[in-house]
Amino acid sequence: MKAVILAAGEGARMGPLTASEPKVMIPAGNRPILEYAVEALVENGIRDLVLVVGYRKERIQSYFEDGGKFGARIEYAVQGKQLGSLHGLWEARALVRGPFLTVNGSNLVDARAVTDLLESGDGPAMIIAESETPEKYGVVALSGHYVETIVEKPRHPESNLVNGGLYLLDASVFPIVEPLLEEGHYDVPSLVNALAAKARIRAVRTKGTWLPALYPWDLLKLNAHVLARIGDLQSGTIEKDVTLRGHVVIGDGSRIRSGTYVLGPTVIGKGCEIGPNVVMYPSTSIGDNVKVQAFSVIENSVLMDDVFLGPQSHVSNSVLASGVRVASNLMASADKAEAQVEGEWHSVERLGALVGEDTEVRDGVVIEPGSIVGARCRIGPLSRVRGNVPNGTNVM
């Protein structure tokens, strides 16, 4: 059996985190979200994979190549225009025969979720999951154990059961796909609704992992989930009087300087320099080639590759994208926040700052909870940032 992984979209709702990176390549636990889907399939013996790529496709292709280092055999289908998930599936039609799985590559899924779908029986099926915010997803109406319809983002959901983005289909669906595309229906749920009118589609509840990444703050939840399952692996240099508690991973060539306190689960990548006298609290991921200078505090945050965090900074429930440079004394603390994405306001229980790639933050800056700073911005010294800052903005 093959699997088709849909990985072509930009993920515009992820804000500045996808300025030059496909959504599926955003890291959780220092690994791309897409890698977890590949791993889950391979663990179930599904090694023939078709990755549907589009936006920044070279980033995906250069990372996964032919799939050999992941135990897979990967082919690529290119979606030239990112019209939607169903259009992406259509672009893979020449590479699949018989039954196949379809996976949304921007969702975090584990091997158990794939197993539950495969073991549910013959014929079409899909994973469903419970959600506290079903109005943000496709809400599934059931007739017994079978899908009746999917309603996308209803204002008043009739249930909390949502589409998990993991399907068991057959190549016989492609004659149904073509007229749907001609009618302007570009999403896979449209196929499910059309198919449900002709055949029974099993709704499979899973005990495995299904975590979606719709908005930038969802990355913090994915990261915490992944880190809760790590072990211990310490390379590099750990100086005297460093305290490591809980599960902590430290990559090759990294140096943890004296007086630093790390409370896991935490992962620190390769070639990093942390400290002296830095404090890291649980659910923090530090990418490769990151420098965190003296007396800084980081908690429940993601610092991607090549970040420089100057001394006496405080970063909580925040994401700093690749190449962010902070001079000193950044205050990005967390609180209940209202965050705006694509013109819509969202209430987030606890959120700090979301800062796009290659942004420069000078000394003594305060970024208010829920603020989203775009890519390649310049934030002047002693600035107070509130709300959204567009890509490329200079704040003085």
Image (cartoon, rainbow, N blue to C red):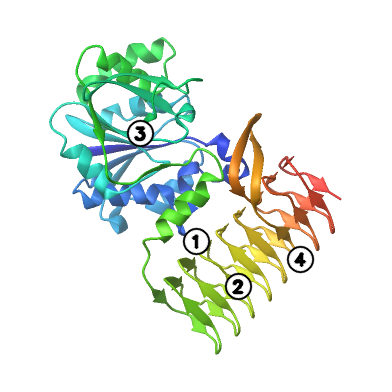
| Residue 279 marker | 2
Alpha carbon of mark 3 to alpha carbon of mark 4: how far? 42 Å
Please identify the quarter of the rendering in which residue 132 is found: top left
| N-terminal label among 3 and 2 | 3
Q: Which residue is mark 1?
A: 283
- Amino acid at circle 2: Val
Alpha carbon of mark 4 to alpha carbon of mark 1: how far? 22 Å
Residue density around tag 2, few if under 14, some if 14–19, many if 20 or more, within 10 Å? many
Q: Which residue is mark 4?
A: 329
- Amino acid at circle 4: Asn
In this rendering, the label closer to the viewer, 2 or 4: 2
Alpha carbon of mark 2 to alpha carbon of mark 4: how far? 15 Å
- Identify the residue at horizontal 57%, vertical 58% (top origin): 301
Alpha carbon of mark 3 to alpha carbon of mark 1: how far? 26 Å
- Is 88 in front, or is 187? 187
Asked if the residue at tag 4 contacts the one at tag 3, i.e. Cβ–Cβ closer than 8 Å, the answer is no
Q: Which residue is mark 3?
A: 165
